[in-house]
Image (cartoon, rainbow, N blue to C red):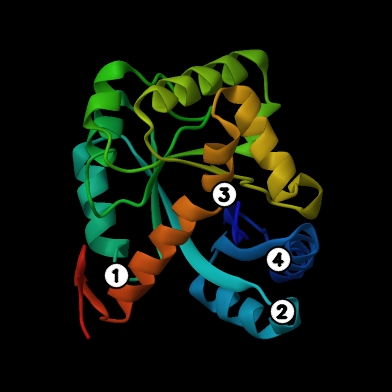
Amino acid sequence: MGKRNFIDFWIRPPDLKVAMEMCKRASDLGYSALVVETSKNMLEELKSSTKEYGLELYSKVVVSAKSRSDILKAAAKFRHSYDVLTVSCLTRSAALVALRDGRIDTVAFRPNGFMNFDRHMLSVMRNPIELALVDVISDRVVLQKMRGIVRLIATKNLSIIFSSCASSPVEQRGPFETSCILNVLGLNFECSLDALSTIPSNILLRNRAKLTGKMVQDGVWLV
């Protein structure tokens, strides 16, 4: 296995001070990049304040959606402004749209939203599902639902991302520790590592290329 660059694809610091602490913690844990749900202004300030940690920082917006209309509006508003657009679905119908809309990067399944993943959703799935480490310990019902989602995805070898969704340093864990949890949920270990490295890295590379004009559309690069 070659060297991997690990990415925490979702942190949610409440303010700049905590964000700086989380950057230091992530660097110490072995991450090379963080995707931060925060304002653009705070992210720029964070970048200038944490250069010593050698982390790549990316912007993320998370939109809660009940309907197809919510997703279309979010894609139109945020797709060209943020590095990562994540939809947290509140209904099954919204999940079906978000899973196949090419402008969406990840579809978050969390206990405060919709978590009843099924085989029809599996059949239309185009975008990676994102699960959160902070939800693993929430309660037994959530844990069983997460295990069911992971095992269904594993049957088709589809993409999954496992983020910390941390809002403080105490909720952050190292990439190998985190991947082991995903492995326990039902994904083989190599794919569990991909969920924290290869898969999020490919999304960031593609989106940054699009935002900078180096990629015209998926698979079409300017040279």
In this figure, which residue is indicated by the disc labeled 2? 50
Report the Cα–Cα distance between label 1 and label 3: 24 Å
Q: Is residue 148 above or below residue 50?
A: above
Circle count: 4
- Determine whether the residue tagged by mark 1 lies in a helix, strand or loop: loop
In this figure, which residue is indicated by the disc labeled 3? 196
Report the Cα–Cα distance between label 4 and label 3: 20 Å
Displayed quadrant of residue 68: top left
Q: Quadrant of the C terminus?
A: bottom left
Residue type at tag 4: Ala
In this figure, which residue is indicated by the disc labeled 4? 19
Q: Between disc 1 and disc 3, whose residue precedes?
A: 1
Q: Is residue 24 left or right of residue 195?
A: right
Report the Cα–Cα distance between label 2 and label 3: 22 Å
Q: Residues within 10 Å of mark 2 (few under 14, many from 20)?
A: some
Q: Between disc 4 and disc 3, whose residue precedes?
A: 4
Residue in the picture at 59% in, 13% down: 141
Q: Nearer the viewer, mark 1 or mark 3?
A: 3
- Determine whether the residue tagged by mark 3 lies in a helix, strand or loop: loop
In this figure, which residue is indicated by the disc labeled 1? 80
Asked if the residue under mark 3 is in contact with the one under mark 2, i.e. CB atoms within 8 Å, the reply is no
Residue type at tag 3: Leu
For the question of whether residue 180 can be seen, the reply is yes
Report the Cα–Cα distance between label 2 and label 1: 25 Å
Report the Cα–Cα distance between label 1 and label 4: 24 Å
Q: Between disc 1 and disc 4, whose residue precedes?
A: 4
Q: Between disc 2 and disc 3, whose residue precedes?
A: 2
Residue in the picture at 56% in, 23% down: 186
Q: Nearer the viewer, mark 2 or mark 3?
A: 3
Residue type at tag 1: His
Report the Cα–Cα distance between label 4 and label 2: 10 Å
Q: Residues within 10 Å of mark 4 (few under 14, many from 20)?
A: many
